[in-house]
Image (spheres, rainbow, N blue to C red):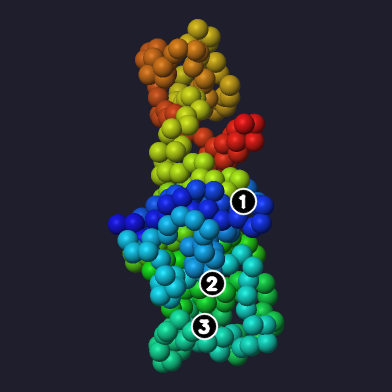
Amino acid sequence: MEIVKTENLSKSYGAFQALSDVSLGIKEGSIYGILGPNGAGKTTLLRILTGILGPDKGQYFFQSNIFTSDYQKRIGYLPEERGLYKKMKVEEQLVYFARLKGVAASEAKTRTTSFLEETGLAEWKNHTVDALSKGMQQKVQFIASIIHNPDLIILDEPFSGFDPVNAELLKNYIFRFRKEGKTILLSTHRMENAEELCDKIVLINKGKNVLEGEVKKIKEGVKKNRLIIEGEGILPENKLLYEVVDSETFAGNQFIATLIPAPGIVLNKIIEVLMPHINFKSFKEELPSLHEIFIDKIKGESDE
């Protein structure tokens, strides 16, 4: 079931077209990435999905129903621009945000205590937010976005301001929430995070959806046509079949090499020819990274 579905969403600010006919579907219980360069329209899309903004045209469905403000309490939103009350105490603030989302007072206190302990902030609960480091404030903001147990969690550049330890903590939360059946919508410019975390992505550029699909299928659909071989033996030269573009040799004729097939040569043919000469340990087709796909796609759009 799709928790979110949009049909031809468009939004403009005066003469500037921020979004143009963006259609996408987000499966319940998945981690979905929204990628794109700065100014592509990602934040505008997120604000529409949270109900902060309305589209100029198009439809937005939440769990198969037309989205209304009634659904906002079922959404958690971590904005890129952080919005905490600097002079308010940490525990008091989190309980306040939970109450705003309809959580009973006693339950709000219980959840706050639990999250503060999990994130290492328990000893800071009676400090005002402005006494915390940037990373600590980021954790408080994250807790505020999930304190009401939402079905859809929208995270806009969530790793900004996090050191590696706290970034790993956030990743663990994301995987935990997916395991619990929640849906996570992740907007990031860090391709390595999207590649590690997301089941499916959409690439937004100049307000348009230019690429959408499962990460694995997207990568397989944009093959680099390179073969990475690890084995033992002497790799023969055969420029009619392939070119060796990278090779590293170890003790005992062990090696790792990257081969590019000659035009018209399939990878299986190369493996067949090499088998009498090499004791294969592994071989795999090299797939492009999301970063490479992102750069190529954006460059292609710019050239049009």
For the residue pair 93 and 56, the one nearer the viewer reads as: 56
Which residue: 39% across, 14% down? Answer: 269
Quarter of the image with the N terminus in it:
bottom left
Residue situated in front as seen by the camera: 247 or 119 = 119
**Does 94 sit left or right of 64 as displayed?**
right
- According to the picture, the residue beneath numbered tag 1 turns out to be 17
175 to the left or right of 253 = left
* SS class, disc 2: helix
For residue 142, the mark is: 2
Residue at the spot of label 3: 97
Amino acid bearing label 1: Gln
* Left or right: 119 in relation to 163: left
Q: Return the disc, 3 or 1, that comes first in the chain's sequence.
A: 1
Residue 81 lies in what quarter of the image? Answer: bottom right
Q: In this view of the protein, can residue 112 be seen by the observer? A: no
Question: For numbered disc 1, what is the local secondary structure?
Answer: strand
- Callout 3: 10 Å neighbours few (<14), some, many (20+)? some
The vertical placement of 30 against 293, above or below, is: below
Residue in the image at 32% along x and 61% along y: 64
Q: Which mark is residue 177?
A: none
Query: Looking at the picture, does residue 48 appear above or below residue 118?
Result: above
Q: The disc labelled 2 sits on which kind of residue?
A: Phe
Q: Quadrant of the C terminus?
A: top right
Q: Residue furthest top?
A: 240
